[in-house]
Image (cartoon, grey):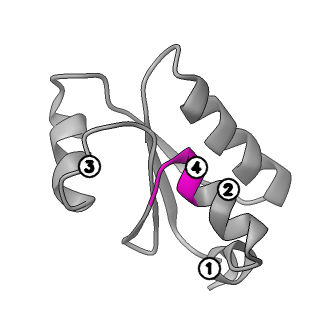
Amino acid sequence: MAKIEIYVQDFCPYCARAKALLDRKGVAYEEIYAPNGSEARRQATERSGGRTTVPQVFVNGQALGGSDDLAALDRAGKLDALLAA
């Protein structure tokens, strides 16, 4: 099973959507609380190549992007293989 990490903050509808998609896939993930100005947010920005928004989703250390990116991968039929790796 892949190692999945998701950086989130409170009251973020995009975070909720991304987590709901991962929940529907039945995969375990590590949720990292990363509000603006936090060290976790700085790490997410650095790891994602400069993206400053949440959520930021990583699978086996690879940045997949945010909620829309995750949904696009799912629609394209590519997400399941990444999550299973």
Q: Are marks 3 and 1 in contact (CB under 8 Å)?
A: no
Mark closer to the chain start, 2 or 3:
3
Q: Residues within 10 Å of mark 3 (few under 14, many from 20)?
A: some
Q: Residues within 10 Å of mark 2 (few under 14, many from 20)?
A: some
- Reading the image, the residue beneath label 3 is 51
Q: Along the polypeptide, which appears first: circle 3 or circle 4?
A: 3
Residue ID at (15%, 23%): 37
**Tag 4's secondary structure?**
helix
Residue flagged by tag 2: what amino acid is it? Ala
Q: Which residue is mark 1?
A: 82
Q: Which residue is mark 2?
A: 71
| Three-letter code, disc 1 | Leu
Q: Quadrant of the C terminus?
A: bottom right
Label 2 close to label 4 by CB (< 8 Å): yes
Which of 19 and 74 lies nearest the eye of the viewer? 74
Q: Main secondary structure of the magenta part?
A: helix
Q: Which residue is depicted at the point 15% across and 34% down?
A: 39
Tell which residue pokes out farthest to the top in this image: 11
Residue 50: horizontal and vertical position, in percent?
A: 18, 53
The magenta segment is 65-69
Label 2, label 4: how many angstroms apart (C-alpha)? Answer: 5 Å
Q: Of label 1 and label 4, which has the lower sequence position?
A: 4
The label on residue 68 is 4
